[in-house]
Image: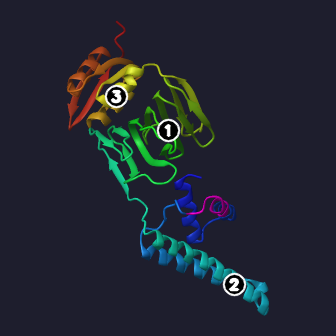
Amino acid sequence: MDELRQTYLIKKYIDGTATQAEREELLLWYRQKGIDDNSWPYLSELDEAEAKERIFKGVKRQVSDTPSARGRTGTLFYKIAVAASVIGAVCCFVLWRFAQKEVAPALITISTRAGETKTLQLTDGSVIWLSAKSTLTYPASFKGPTRDVAFSGEAFFDIAKDKQHPFIVSTGSTSTRVLGTSFNISALKENDNVTVALITGKVSFTGSKTAVSLLPNNQVVYNKATKEARVMPIADIDAVVGRHNGYYEYKNIPSKDVAEDLGRLYGMNIKVVGNVQNCTFYGRIKPGESPVKFLKKMAFVLNASVTTKDSVWIIKGGGCNLK
């Protein structure tokens, strides 16, 4: 059981919202592993006090509402004993937390706006290049058996090797698990697919209905709606690697998709109208190159025109230039 799952189950147990199956899973883990290396799910005494109060009221109500408890002193005493044991378990968790004098590592969230990129180095030595309109949430320091982060958007990951502590990237309904490798993830909220392209190492990808392993130079494309995953070779490794260095290459890409990508990367509002939407485009924009100049070149290649009004760039035309 990874650390996020442990914390989730402990918190639900204390809140009194855990199902019978979740309580049994937590009990099994506790028997096998103990709780010495786990982080406490509450970050303040107030949270803990509120949790204890909720579970106490819930158990008290359970006892008073049980028909077998009314008028049967022995049963009532038994119910009270059960209630006391549950509350005692909560108190043991609280005492353990203060004895450890350890608070779960603070979570840090880094986001980028349209037209903005950032490079991060985590405490384990991993380096992550965040593309525009992306968000990464990670702990200030990694503790426990796994290194867990949450992510949305697009980023290139170069993960430090640590065979004892897998690195797990969660993107909503999917997770990517590695020991030490480099890969690119595209998990934009507005896109239908999550794509993981592996450059070096090995990756285990898990979705709602599927689990696959990737080898270098391959990618998995996961459809959010159908929950299906397809594994295929990466058509252009250099194009994938180049993106985090500011080289954006498009080969046989629909013009509207190119416009959407450029708009996110450069913080521009670009619209493609008319038959030119059906055209595909080949082209490359380099670091430092003017995106406006690139748009004009793109319009020329597609036999279209480009105009601007109220900060909106419009590409329109009658069709594609087949020459």
- Please report the residue visible at 61 percent of the width from the left and 59 percent of the height from the top: 33
Q: Earlier in the sequence, mark 2 or mark 1?
A: 2
Density class for disc 3 (Cα within 10 Å; few <14, some 14-19, many ≥20) is: some
How far from the left and from the top, in percent, is residue 175?
52, 43
Q: CA distance from mark 2 to mark 1?
A: 47 Å
- Please report the residue visible at 47 percent of the width from the left and 72 percent of the height from the top: 99
Magenta residues (range): 27-35
The quadrant the C terminus occupies is: top left
How far from the left and from the top, in percent, is residue 307?
22, 27
How far from the left and from the top, in percent, is residue 110?
33, 49
Quadrant housing residue 154: top left
Q: Is residue 169 above or below residue 272?
A: below
Density class for disc 2 (Cα within 10 Å; few <14, some 14-19, many ≥20) is: few
User: What amino acid type is highlighted by mark number 3?
Assistant: Arg
- Residue at the spot of label 3: 243
Q: Earlier in the sequence, mark 1 or mark 3?
A: 1
Q: Are marks 2 and 1 in contact (CB under 8 Å)?
A: no
The circle drawn on residue 81 is 2
Q: Nearer the viewer, mark 2 or mark 3?
A: 2
User: What amino acid type is highlighted by mark number 2?
Assistant: Ala
- Please report the residue visible at 54 percent of the width from the left and 72 percent of the height from the top: 93
The circle drawn on residue 179 is 1
Q: CA distance from mark 1 to mark 3?
A: 23 Å
In this view of the protein, can residue 216 be seen by the observer? yes
Density class for disc 1 (Cα within 10 Å; few <14, some 14-19, many ≥20) is: many
User: What amino acid type is highlighted by mark number 1?
Assistant: Leu
Provide the major secondary structure of the magenta segment. Answer: helix
SS category of the residue bearing label 3:
helix
Quadrant housing residue 155: top left
Q: Nearer the viewer, residue 185 or 88?
A: 88
